[in-house]
Image (cartoon, grey):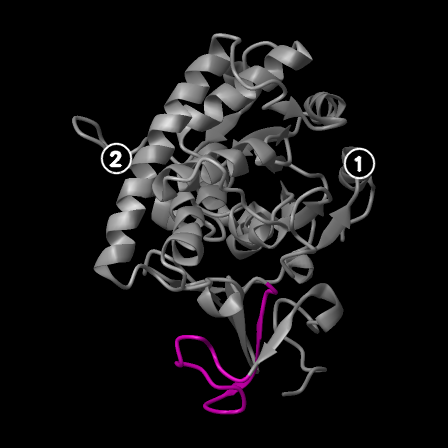
Amino acid sequence: MNKSIVFPGLGKPSPSDGWLFLEKCSDNLHIAGKNGVTDIVSTGDGKVELIASEKNTLAYVKSAMGYPAYYPLYPTALKKPVKAVLMDLDGTTVRSEEFWIWIIEQSTATLLGDKSFRLTEEDIPYVSGHSVSEHLLYCIRKYALGIGAIGAGSAGKHPGSASETTALAEARTYYTALTEREMELILEGKGRANAFTPSPGVKDFLLGLKKLDIKIALVTSGLYRKAYPEIISAFDTLKMGDPAKFYDCIITGGHPLGEGSAGTLGELEAKPHPWLYAEACAVGLGIPKEESGAVIGIEDSAAGVCAIRLAGFYTIGISGGNIIESGALGMCDRYCDSFDEILEIIKGGTNE
């Protein structure tokens, strides 16, 4: 492996950014040094692998549900003036990760029949930032089946047995019931205190974007029934009115598949797949692909920055999430500690 190799569209991946250098892709289709492949790296959490050749880079996005995909990795360069900003919900706009991790924890506790069950610190990168099914499947493998699904090696393995499939369906039932109950309580003002708290500086940032006449899209993998109460709660706290009238576009993971209702592909197309961000820009905001250089995406999670980057937009990571811990810093064009820093990047007079 040549750790000084250049990945087209990315540059030189450094281990200090969390990259892991691999001998081969986890699906065994690509081997470093063979058939034109120069090198292969993975994000630290093992969710996304990059395969470099002389002229291009492919990204292999794993799937715990058994539907992985390859995407080309295009170079990104910010072109001023900025036309649109795409923003994540959980952790970026609203601080709610602890609440949703608690939901996963309680769903697992119900599945195990153990009210005292608690997740550990080492579980956190695997129960936040990805799809609900992936979060629950991780817990099932580690705690219900005793497989010990920790680390990059298990990150993309889909349900491989009847016991896993059955347990996942049962866990999702508990998750759905708990979510519906908690959302109703929150909308009634009776839910968990401070479940959804606006991120520091987000109000001034959003209003600053409006003054610059920049389009704003809210993008989340969360299903509508869980995502919308979050943003309503945050806007009520901020006294910013109706979020549907404020944002130019809101994209969620859709509605759950259930009896008598249309479902969603959100569980299969969730971040780190690029489709939610691509849809927000191309369909929701009407910005064509050739103008993607004037679009910025902001995320606090590893899955999120990968999704933005694979959609071809200038990617800004913001601190407070799991980007560094999950080894995805190398997918960010910039990494900032505050919205003030990001607004300065947007307002600056030069392209990047």
- CA neighbours of label 1 inside 10 A, class few (<14), some (14 to 19), many (20+): some
Which SS class for mark 1? helix
Question: At 40% from the left edge and 32% from the top edge, which residue is drawn?
Answer: 223
Q: Position of residue 330 (x, y in %)?
A: 68, 62
Q: Tell me the quarter of the picture where residue 94 sits.
A: top right
Front position in the image: 311 or 214: 311
As drawn, 185 above or below 100: above
The answer to whether residue 95 shows anywhere in this view is yes
Q: Which residues are magenta?
A: 23-44
Question: Which residue is identified by label 1?
Answer: 347
- Badge nearest the viewer, 2 or 1: 2
Residue displayed at 44% across by 57% down: 142
Q: Nearer the viewer, residue 328 or 147?
A: 147
Amino acid at pointer 2: Leu
- The residue nearer to you, when weighing 72 against 159, is 159
Q: Which residue is mark 2?
A: 257
Taking the spot 74% from the left edge, 52% from the top edge, the residue there is 334
Looking at numbered disc 1 in the image, what kind of residue is underneath it? Lys
Comes first in the chain, label 2 or label 1: 2
- Distance from Cα at disc 2 to Cα at disc 1: 42 Å
Q: Is residue 277 above or below residue 310?
A: above
- Residue 289: x and y in percent read 50, 49
**187 left or right of 201?**
left
Relative placement, left or right, of 311 versus 184 is right
Residue 219 visible in the shown view: no
Residue 223 within the segment the image draws in magenta: no
**Numbered disc total:** 2
Quadrant location of the N terminus in the rendered image: bottom right
Query: Given contact means CB atoms under 8 Å apart, are the residues at marks 2 and 1 in contact?
Result: no
Crowd tier of the residue under label 2, counting other residues whose Cα lies within 10 Å: few below 14, some 14–19, many 20 or above: few
**Coordinates of residue 271 in the picture (x, y in percent):** 48, 48
Q: Which numbered dot is residue 310?
A: none
